[in-house]
Amino acid sequence: MGTKKQQPRGLFITLEGGEGSGKSTHIRHLAEVLTQAGYPVLQTREPGGTATAEAIRHILLTASSHEPVTPQAEALLILAARCQHVTHLIRPALQRGALVLCDRFSDSTFAYQGFARGLDLHWLRAANEFATGGLTPDLTVVLDLPVSVGLSRRRANRGQQNRLDSETERFHRKVRRGFLALAAEEPGRMTIVNSNRPAQEVRDELTEIVVGWIARPRRSPRHRS
Ligand code: TMP
């Protein structure tokens, strides 16, 4: 056989959004629906997904205020976790032909570390490319809702709060604007769903978008990597 690099055959779908947008609940439901429909689904999350990446997640979300994590260290830790995740879980699953559903990915880094923390977006994009080997989601759905609504949902559920939840509302407004700006830049890949509605409505629209998108005829290779 020739030396042509084998293209991954799976599909890579990510769910993005600010705090309290309901991603984790909706992605679980989506995974169930798609599994029942016979797709070989791998559900995962960021930061995390492998043992090392989950250990980095723990550092990121629980770091003590005695030694604040700098924005630069935060970005590097997130990218290190992503590199492990892509190398050891996501890429092998795509190579096997799996449908990978990931709760957050690179767009979170651009929105949180870029738009909200103020790190240079060009640098972040280049470093992200280095960490992922250029792997980009095929489809990204952003669950959007007003920051005040998302934060009060999170506060009502105190067990879920993490270090980034306690950032100012202004910070979270920048995250939201970041996601909306990213979606405007790439309308072919990114779709926005209004999450400020009853969960059932959001779930139905999300399922319809993803199932409809999967069923669309497409030419190989199915995603950029
Ligand atoms: P989660 O609450 O959706 O599980 O995400 C954990 C936190 O990590 C959330 O506050 C957003 C943050 N995060 C970043 O700041 N940058 C990233 O690239 C990712 C993946 C997450």
Image (cartoon, rainbow, N blue to C red):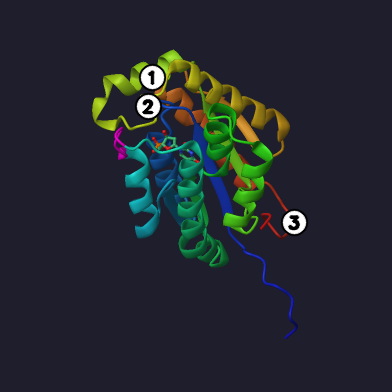
Q: Nearer the viewer, residue 80 or 215?
A: 80
Secondary structure beneath label 1: helix
Whichever of labels 2 and 3 marks the residue nearer the N terminus, that label is 2
Residue 165: give its label: 2
Q: Mark 1 points at which residue?
A: 151
Looking at the image, do the residues carrying marks 1 and 2 touch, with CB atoms under 8 Å apart?
yes
Secondary structure beneath label 3: loop
Indicate whether 188 appears above or below 158.
below
Looking at the image, do the residues carrying marks 3 and 1 touch, with CB atoms under 8 Å apart?
no
Q: Where is residue 138 in the image (x, y as percent from the top left)?
A: 63, 48
Give the CA distance from mark 3 to mark 1: 41 Å
Residue 219: give its label: 3
Query: Is the residue indicated by label 2 positioned so its CB lies within 8 Å of ligand 1?
Result: yes
Q: Can residue 145 be seen in the rendering of this structure? A: no
Q: How crowded is mark 3: few (under 14 residues within 10 Å), some or many (20 or more)?
A: few
Q: Residues within 10 Å of mark 1 (few under 14, many from 20)?
A: many
Camera-nearest label, 2 or 3: 2
Give the residue at x 59% y 22%. 177
Camera-nearest label, 1 or 2: 2
Ligand 1's image quarter is top left
Whichever of labels 3 and 1 marks the residue nearer the N terminus, that label is 1
Secondary structure beneath label 2: loop
